Each structure stands twice: as C-alpha cells, then as structure tokens.
C-alpha cells in the first residue's frame, strides 16, 4: 500500500506511474478527497477547541451564580457535540474512501523498471543454455502431456474424473519425480542460506491483505465457507510471518523458503494452456521470500534471481531472464524479473519463476517494521521480496520435454538421480 503522505506530496508522479502501469487512477478525485479530509480535520479541531473553552466557562459562570448564562453555554456545548459528531462522521467517510483508493492502487515502479504496455515490451536480460535441436537428432519431439501419458506417469483423464479440468494426477515415477523436484529445490535453497518453513495451505483474509491478494484479486482465490482461503503461493505465509512485528536491523536480511501446494482459480485465463502442467488450479511450488533493509533490497533481488537461476542451471534446462515492464508487472511489485524455461512444445520460453522486490508496499499493509538505533530514531518499514524457486509442475514439464529420448523414454537430470532412488531413465510403466 502506498503512503498517504507520499501520494499527497507526489500526485503528478503517482499519476504518471499509474498511467505507465495501465492502472486506474483518478488524480482529481484523490485531490478532492484529500482536501475534504483536511477541511474535516480542521473543523473537528476548531469545534473541539471551542467546546473545551466553553466547558471551562461553564464552571466559572456557575461559580459566579450566572445560572442562565451557564445553561445557555451548556446548550451551545451540546450543539457543538452534534456538529463535532457530524464532522467526525464526514472525516471517517472520506478516510474510508481514501483508504479504498490506496489499497486498490498498485505499487510505484522502480526507476529501473522499463516503461511498457504489456508482455511484448519486456526486455530480455540474458539467456543460458542452448535448446536442443531435436530435428537434427532425428527425434520428433512430443509435448509433455503426451510424453506423460505414454509413459504412464501423467493421467489427465482420471484427474478430470476425480476433480475436474485443470487438475493433474501423477502416478509411479511421475509422483516420484514431483517429490524429487520438491526436495531437490528445498535442499538447494537451504544450502544457500534460506531458512525452510512448513506453512499452512490456508490463510485468513488479513494475511492475504498483507501481501496484496485481497481485496483486488479475490476472484482468483478459492474460498471456504468459513471465510478462509487456499493460498495461491507460499509468499502469502512467508511474508506475513512477521506481520505486526518490529525486526532488528542486525537480523536483516532474512531469507526464507517453503514448499506448499498452491491453489488458483485462474479466472482470467480461460482457454490458455488447457493441456498439461502449465496452468492448473492446484500445483506445487517452492517459494523464496526475503526481508531486507531498503538500501539493500535491490541487491537482494539480484541474488534471489541468481538463486532461481542456480536451480535451472543445475538441472541443465535452457532459460532466459526478462525484466517485466510497468504494464505487465504484478500489483505489489516495484521491479520484477521473470525466468522463462525453454519448452519445445511451445517452441518458445515459458515463465517458470517470477522474482520481485515489493519495496515497503507489503510491509505497510502487514505492518512489518525494523529498528536500527545506530542510524535512525524510531522504526521504518522493511522491504519484502519474493520469488519462485521454482514452480514444480512447470519444472517437470521442462524436464520431460527437454530430456526426452528417441525411444520415448526420458532421461533423469543427473542432479535428481539421488532423489529418484537411483533411477536414471523413466520408461513406460
């Protein structure tokens, strides 16, 4: 959430940023409400001062035996109380509308975030690895959904029977591979200094508000009858671990990671990626989250991207890194890098990780601060960062497609063989 004072003092900059983000922003309405709020506060203060003065007079008048004048003054105090209640109600109404504007306004982009309209304006930063030339090898590459079916490790039809569309059922070495990828990723991150957490797969509304999913993106969430939500990412839980707390500067940065199942309605994705493991209602992911000092957060973003890249490089999967432009960036982010893995079935790169610096946007919503008495008085909001490390289903899809062999089998990446109990090749079951 943006700071009210910042918005008030930088209205032109906020308007320009929201235009760059394709976000709705009514500058005139904000200015009108802010002026009304100031006027209401001034009226409250004036009435309170008058009431306090008159209240003192009442005692003096009674002491002087001026009962009638004292009663008249009491009547005036009663009128002031009514006026004060009306002024307070007006201010609360204005405050409420201003609050709604602020909680529905996305974060300010970083100065280093490229300006653009949509995904077509996302500049490429770098590439790693060279996609296989299957034609040169004499192999007709199959998509992962056909590979999985042929190998007997992905059963889409029975998943539909059990739950519906956009779910998957993994069997045999498919289930083993999913588990292997999860454990491999968690081990890689903990070996690089991340503290692992095991989180609830459900969260309350306050928690989802803290990271920015609520209220704006409620339609993308699965909600229970009790008002709880299935989490769309472990970012929700990891970022809110310290909600309402004051951290110590000496303990920053904090590096956290967690595996969780993730649940998304995909309400805005009708007709997209309907086959395979790319876009599901339920999927597994290992997530990274960091809490950092403001002056260190963008360096921490670069190192987070490197941690995600390390997973792909160790698995030998070709990928590229892009920077998201202002028009394609997520609600809470100030700067985002996407990692896109090469998928032969798409003949292109597909997102497998998104790493973002949310600056103090989420920390303000979740009230996460830190103290650094050697450098400043009081407390300040921390910066929070999050990144996929990685999406497990998409990683499996990339492994199946990039490691498929001429005979229809799939070679297991060397790094995963120990997690697969020594299995080096997945063959038809």
Image: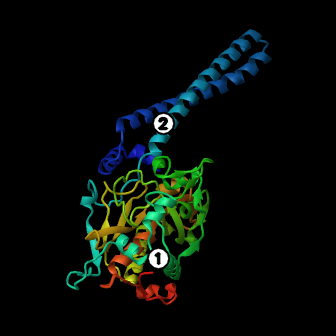
Residue at the spot of label 1: 174
- Label 2: few (<14), some or many (≥20) within 10 Å? some
- Camera-side residue of 190 and 294: 190
Q: SS class of the residue under badge 2?
A: helix
Judged left or right of residue 229, residue 280 is left
- Label 1: few (<14), some or many (≥20) within 10 Å? some
> Residue 319, position in %: x, y?
32, 75
**Residue 396 placement: quadrant:** bottom left
Residue 190 position (above or below residue 231): below
- Camera-side residue of 357 and 311: 311
Judged left or right of residue 318, residue 6 is right
Identity of the residue drawn at 30% across and 85% down: 406
Residue 382 position (above or below residue 103): below
Q: SS class of the residue under badge 1?
A: helix
> Residue 352, position in %: x, y?
38, 69
The answer to which of marks 2 and 1 sits earlier in the sequence is 2
Residue at the spot of label 2: 97
Answer whether labels 2 and 1 touch (C-beta < 8 Å): no
């Amino acid at each position: 959430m943006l700071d009210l004072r910042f918005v008030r003092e930088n209205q032109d900059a906020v308007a320009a940023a929201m235009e760059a983000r394709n976000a709705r922003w009514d500058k005139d309405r904000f200015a009108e409400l802010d002026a009304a709020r100031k006027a209401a506060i001034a009226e409250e203060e004036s009435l309170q001062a008058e009431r306090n003065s008159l209240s003192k007079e009442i005692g003096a008048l009674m002491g002087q035996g001026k009962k009638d004048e004292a009663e008249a003054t009491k009547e005036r105090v009663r009128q002031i109380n009514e006026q004060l209640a009306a002024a307070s109600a007006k201010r609360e109404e204005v405050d409420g509308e201003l609050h709604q504007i602020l909680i529905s306004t996305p974060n300010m982009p970083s100065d280093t975030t490229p300006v653009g309209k949509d995904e077509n304006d996302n500049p490429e930063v770098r590439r790693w690895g060279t996609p296989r030339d299957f034609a040169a090898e004499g192999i007709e590459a199959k998509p992962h959904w056909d590979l999985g079916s042929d190998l007997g490790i992905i059963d889409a039809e029975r998943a539909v029977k059990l739950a519906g569309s956009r779910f998957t059922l993994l069997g045999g070495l498919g289930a083993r591979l999913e588990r292997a990828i999860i454990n491999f990723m968690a081990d890689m991150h903990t070996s690089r200094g991340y503290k692992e957490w095991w989180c609830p797969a459900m969260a309350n509304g306050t928690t989802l508000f803290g990271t920015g999913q609520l209220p704006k993106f409620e339609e993308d969430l699965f909600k229970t009858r009790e008002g709880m939500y299935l989490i769309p990412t472990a970012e929700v839980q990891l970022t809110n671990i310290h909600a309402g707390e004051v951290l110590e500067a000496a303990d920053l940065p904090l590096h956290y990671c967690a595996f969780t199942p993730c649940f998304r309605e995909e309400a805005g994705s009708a007709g997209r990626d309907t086959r395979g493991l790319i876009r599901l209602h339920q999927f597994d992911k290992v997530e990274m989250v960091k809490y950092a000092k403001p002056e260190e957060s963008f360096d921490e973003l670069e190192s987070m991207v490197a941690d995600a890249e390390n997973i792909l490089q160790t698995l030998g999967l070709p990928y590229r890194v892009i920077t998201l432009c202002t028009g394609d960036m997520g609600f809470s982010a100030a700067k985002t890098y996407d990692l896109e893995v090469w998928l032969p079935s798409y003949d292109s790169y597909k997102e497998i990780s998104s790493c973002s610096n949310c600056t103090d946007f989420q920390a303000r919503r979740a009230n996460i601060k830190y103290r650094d008495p050697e450098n400043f008085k009081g407390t300040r909001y921390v910066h929070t960062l999050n990144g996929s490390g990685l999406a497990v289903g998409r990683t499996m899809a990339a492994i199946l497609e990039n490691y498929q062999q001429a005979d229809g089998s799939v070679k297991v990446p060397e790094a995963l063989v120990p997690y697969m109990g020594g299995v080096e090749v997945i063959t038809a079951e």
